Amino acid sequence: MKRWPLGPGVLLALAGLTACVAPSGRGVARDAERAETRAALEDGVRLYESGEYAMAAPRFAAGASGAERLGDLPLAWRAVAAECTSWLLGRQLAELDACSLRLDALQRRTHQTDGGTNALISLGAVAGGRAQPTVNVPRPVRTVVRPGWEELR
C-alpha cells in the first residue's frame, strides 16, 4: 500500500474546508454594485433637484446600468425614465433621442407601461426626427407631438 505524504493531504483538506466556509466574492461584488447603483441614483436626484439636469442624466444612466447588472429591471426602467426626463429638461435633444430608445426597449423587457414613460418615448422620437413608436401616448401629449408626427410624414 502506497502512503501519501501527510503535509499535502492536510493542505488539500484545509483548502477544501476553507472553500466551503469562506464567503463568496460574488456577494461582496453584488453589495458593492448595489452601493454604487444607490450612490449614482442619489447623486442624480440631488443634481436633478438642484436644476442641474444635464449633470443628473449621466448619474441616472449609471444607476440604470447598475440596476440592470443587478437584475432589477423595474429600478432600471425608472432610472432610465429619470435620465430621459433630465435630458428633456436640460434641452439635450440628441441625448433624449438615444435615451428614449433605451427606455422603449427596457419598457418592453419589463412588460410595464405608463403614460409618462410613453410620453418620454414619443417626445424622444420627435427630438430625434424618427417616426412615432407604437406606444399609447396620453391625450395631452398628443397635441404637443402631433406637429412632429405630421412633419415626418
Image: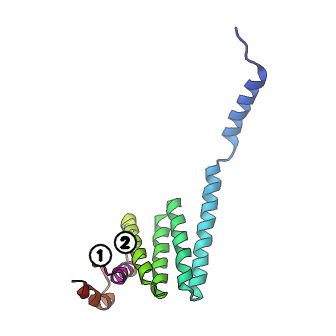
**Quadrant location of residue 84?**
bottom left
Asked if residue 28 is positioned above or below residue 50 in the image, the reply reads above
Per the image, is 33 magenta? no
Q: Quadrant of residue 120?
A: bottom left
Q: Main secondary structure of the magenta part?
A: helix
Q: Residue furthest left?
A: 153
Q: Which residue is mark 2?
A: 104
Q: Residue at x 71, y 29 (%)?
A: 12
Seen in the picture, residue 25 relative to 102 is either above or below; the reply is above
Location of mark 1 (residue)? 133
Q: Is residue 125 above or below residue 63?
A: below
Q: Amino acid at mark 2?
A: Asp
Question: Residue 2 sits in which quadrant?
Answer: top right
- Residue 18 x/y as whole percent: 71, 38
* Magenta residues, start to end: 117-130
Pinpoint residue 82: horizontal percent, then vertical percent. Answer: 49, 78
Picture residue at 41% right of the left edge, 74% below the top: 98
Image spot of residue 147 (x, y percent): 27, 90
Q: Which kind of residue does numbered mark 1 sit on?
A: Pro
Which one is nearer the viewer's eye here, 38 or 128?
Answer: 128
Callout count = 2
